[in-house]
Image (cartoon, rainbow, N blue to C red):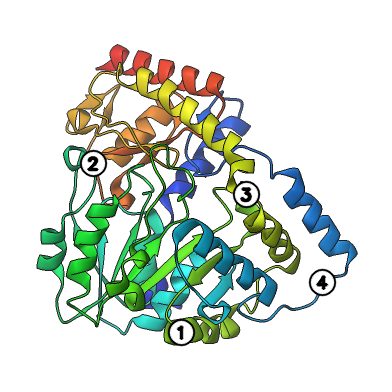
Amino acid sequence: MEKLSDRVQRLGYSQTFVMSNKAREMKASGIDVISLTLGEPDFDVPDNIKQAAFDAINENYSHYSPVPGFLELREAIAYKLKRDNELEYKPSQICVSNGAKQAILNVLAALLNDGDEVILPNPYWVSYDEMVKMMGGTSVMLPTSYVTDFKITAEQLEEAITEKTKAVLFSSPCNPSGGYYTYDELKSLAAVIAKYPHVTVISDEIYEYINYETKTTSIAQFPEVYEQTAVINGMSKAFAMTGWRIGYSACPEWLAKACEKIQGQMTSGANTMAQKASITALKTDPSEYKYMIDAFRKRRDLVYDLIKEIPGFKVVLPKAAFYFFPDISFYIGKTLNGTEIKNSDDFAMFLLENAHVGCVGGVSFGSPECIRFSYAASEDDLKEAMRRIKHTLEQFS
């Protein structure tokens, strides 16, 4: 007798964690694996943020917070959105969650009925499609490629919108491609979305500070779609606070209240000490944490020079985040060292088992011809990883 729900059986496991766990298992068995799987800064949390958490413990911030977060934190988020994004939000429009992942789930749960459609530009973060499934929705994929810098056009978006469309969900800067939508590109997308008031944009901006070219634009900056936009962000990437689990949404009042209602029945408020530390992080001038961005840029340039030399890889220079997303379609259909490469997941497993380098196949990102490498790792590991991949492919191709 099957006891599991249809809902859970529709879901897949996160391929990011599947590959990460496989790399850990191999390493534990004594194999020298370099894992470039997880999207996690390899820096320690800055001292001023850690001290704020210690202070919160000593001041006995150990009880439940309000469901949408401490007012002081929501005021700090509103301050940050005004300072960095030229966006006006009241604390009542902000809901602090247990990571940005929960913030997205809150919004989807508030919007979707069974069968509603959510447009996902490919590639997308691995959890987006599974989140849509979890909430009873249907994902509508819009294809891109490295030729278009992995970005959709306004024409593509307009063609995809139907009466069933409830949301458009994307990240900019993008995980996994490392690209971002420019001001003009977002303006053209906003012009389309404004025609369809039944559509909400869910704009995941968790990588906004890790932009090597310019200041990241939020689609919520365009007045015609401000009331149709849910901005998602959090503390994990810019402040190296992945394990602290603080994310947030900034939404129209009606949607913010719905997110609060859902979260109140699910988890209640987020960790109180982490909330207090986040106030310090957000109020500090972003230039104080720029050393991490500078290090990521240096590593990006290092890997770009090396990855271009790997046979069969087609790659564009990522302008943001900390990922490379090369097209490896050259190898699809080939057999390498006895392994048939049907898609990029097979190729990622081949690299793990033969080059002992962990990456993530692009199938769960919606791009089965690509693989994702994180370069949030030491320069020595990155050099050695690229050397191993090149040597392995030259040996078995």
| Marks 1 and 4, how far apart at CA | 29 Å
Quarter of the image that includes the N terminus:
bottom left
| Local crowd size for mark 2, using a 10 Å CA cut-off: few (<14), some (14–19), many (≥20) | some
**What numbered label is drawn on residue 285?**
3
Neighbourhood count class around disc 3 (C-alpha, 10 Å): few under 14, some 14–19, many 20 upward: few
- Give the mark nearer the N terminus: 1 vs 2: 2
For marks 3 and 2, give the one nearer the viewer: 3
Left or right: where does residue 340 sit relative to residue 251?
A: left
For the residues labelled 3 and 4, the Cα–Cα distance comes to: 28 Å
Q: Earlier in the sequence, mark 3 or mark 4?
A: 4
Instruction: Give the number of callouts.
Output: 4
For label 4, the crowd category at 10 Å Cα-Cα, with few meaning under 14, some 14 to 19 and many 20 or more, is few
Residue 30 or residue 127, whichever sits in front: 127
Looking at the image, which residue is at 54% across and 44% down?
A: 40
Residue at horizontal 24%, vertical 66%? Answer: 190
Residue 149's disc number? 2
Q: Measured from the top left, where is residue 18 in percent x and y?
A: 46, 47
In the picture of the structure, the residue carrying the numbered disc 1 is 253
Q: Which of the two marks, 1 or 2, is nearer to us in this view? A: 1
Which of discs 3 and 1 lies nearer the camera? The answer is 3
Nearer the N terminus, badge 3 or badge 2?
2
Amino acid beneath label 3: Asp
Callout 3: SS: loop
